[in-house]
Amino acid sequence: MGSVSSPENVTYLPTTVTRTVKLLVSGHFGVGKTTFVASVSEIDPLRTEEPMTQESVGIDDLQGLPEKTHTTVAMDFGRITFSRTALYLFGTPGQNRFGYLWDELARGAHGALVLVDTRRLEQSDDVLAAIERRGLRYAVAVNQFDGSARFPLEEVREALDLDPATPLISCDARNRTSSLHTLITLFEHLIRQPEHL
């Protein structure tokens, strides 16, 4: 019986890694979770995107998202390694009808990054509540979209009623450097209480 050789493009976990950390990348529908995971992942990200159909009309709020044609139906997955730590990134689906997947994705998570969009900030309330219900420590990143108004972070903090200790930063999910900075901010927040890692 013959064997199948491994694909040549597989990127294995470096042997220097001594710790793995599971992080959720969450946010409401269309906030940029898939883009964020893809921009920082050192491996080809796993995506479970499907085309949007007529059945979603009236269910999915596409206001401000005229270019959106696909949606995540299960999760996104990526990985980024910093020295001896590998961060496993699990992007959550943004639509309420896929909310049942959250419990599985959140199991074993060490923390979460919540992406928000100032054009639809009120939609972040349910996501933040879901993260807090699960007892996850988190950071919030304001994803900057072209043509959207920019607000001082303190105004966003007040609008979201965030605890003063919760990190709040601005990012561009399309930009690898910006997204890496966002992950580093979250990780630094998490290691302040290393018993959670």
Image (cartoon, rainbow, N blue to C red):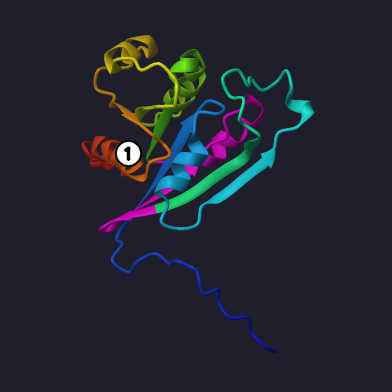
Q: Residue reaching furthest bottom?
A: 1
Write the residue at 25% across / 58% down.
83
Membership of 95 in magenta stretch: yes
The image quadrant that residue 56 belongs to is top right
Write the residue at 21% across / 36% down.
192
Membership of 25 in magenta stretch: no
> Quick one: SS at disc 1?
helix
Left or right of residue 44, residue 61 in this image: right
Residue 115 x %, y %: 43, 29
Q: Which residues are magenta?
A: 80-109
- Quadrant (top left/top right/bottom left/bottom right) for the C terminus: top left
Q: Which residue is mark 1?
A: 178
- Quadrant (top left/top right/bottom left/bottom right) for the N terminus: bottom right
Determine whether 156 is above or below 53 in the image.
above
Q: Residue reaching furthest right?
A: 55
The image quadrant that residue 175 belongs to is top left
Determine whether 88 is above or below 4 in the image.
above
Residue 172 x %, y %: 38, 34
Determine whether 99 is above or below 156 in the image.
below
Q: Nearer the viewer, residue 74 or 154?
A: 154
Residue 91 in view (yes/no): no
Determine whether 16 is above or below 58 in the image.
below
